[in-house]
Image (spheres, grey):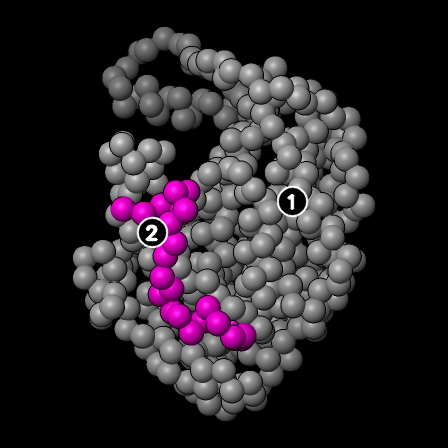
Amino acid sequence: MKKRTVHAGGSSGAPPVATKEENPSERGVANRRSFMKGTLVAGAAAVGAGILANAPFAFAEKTSGALTKGDAAILRFLAAAEIIESDLWLQYQELGGVQDDEVAKLASQLIPGYPAAATGGNPQYLNDLLPLDSDMSQYIHDNTEDELTHEVFINEYLASKGAEKVNLDRFRTLPSSKATGANQFGRLTNLMKLTVDTSFWTRYRSRNKNPDFGDTFPQAIPTLAVGQHPAIPRTDNDAKDANFFQAIVNTAGFHFAFIEQGGSSLYPMLAQRVSSVEVLRILLSIGGTEIAHFQTWQDKAGNAPPLEVVDPVTGVKVTFPDLNSPPFGGEDFQTNLIMPEPTVFLSKKLPACSIIRPTATEGAAMGALSALTADGLFIGQSPAFFSFLRQLAEEADAAKRDHRQE
């Protein structure tokens, strides 16, 4: 039984300019306490409402100083990650999103030559999304818009601090789907040869394991984790077998969640390394939307219709089981269980806690890049593309908090 959820509202890679040198030594963490001062003129509810109402006007325009080298590196890696996300989500939007012109117009302002009008979508793709949820097209549309705004904001913030933006346009060389609804435009990512890690399904339902302790987790859809699978039709020939086409859409449903669980962890991982409170605010604020995306998508993935098919082009087999039946099912694995189960955190001596996981910060950026590469997103990309992203990741992972900024 489905449980409906209400959801709340190119550059060279050289070090950025106008940055401050980091403190090379590790220092003890200074106490940071910030108090909002004012007169309490009403009850607790009114105080809370007053803080929420007044805070944006009081503090929204406060910006100061240049970025540390580490903060700039973290933001540049995140800008690249958001550009990559925008690229893949635009491909899903063209086929399966709400077909107004809002997203296309925004994308056309960012990507040279991108058409400013909606494609009209792919009728069969749109139809096969419905078993996952009747609102899938709206969610795809909104997720795509979110990633585009994240990309723009981070890059413009970097520029406002005199630091170098990230531009990946020269790497838009991968082919588009040739199916109805797809723009014929160079891409950064490949959605037609994916190997999707679905261990997020079991990781977030575990009550005694956490990847930060080295724990590993079984795949919800084992056949998606091997071989190469399309999450969008390659051509209209993929529509000849109705079951196979539904498997393509099912693959997309799990891929949506895979992508967004990565962002859910990446932002808190890197937030622990930033020096500026303002940069910390950016990471916490954008990271929260990634968590909202993940919760939405893992809810919808659980509705994927069970089926077993063979790709008529590659011969690769994929099986989507009933996830409410053994070896899953039961209280901890029911498909409408979309909030993290409490698990071990920080120390096994402490009580279980419902958390985002993983959040250990060591190697966060390189880990994210490795996961996206293993996903098959970059099949066909150039060595220069991998070299550029690797440099961004290494610089972000080298960042250390400078307590002089606190």
* Quarter of the rendering occupied by the C terminus: top right
The percent position of residue 235, horizontal first and vertical second, equals 60, 83
Is 168 located above or below residue 124 in the figure?
A: above
Furthest toward the left, the residue is 331
Q: Is residue 364 magenta?
A: no
The percent position of residue 385, horizontal first and vertical second, equals 73, 57
* Quarter of the rendering occupied by the N terminus: bottom left
Dot placed on the residue nearer the N-terminal end, 1 or 2? 2
The label on residue 393 is 1
Amino acid, disc 1: Ala
What residue range appears in magenta?
208-232
> What is the CA distance from the residue labelled 1 to the residue labelled 2?
26 Å
The percent position of residue 6, horizontal first and vertical second, equals 31, 52
The label on residue 204 is 2
66 to the left or right of 84: right
Amino acid, disc 2: Tyr
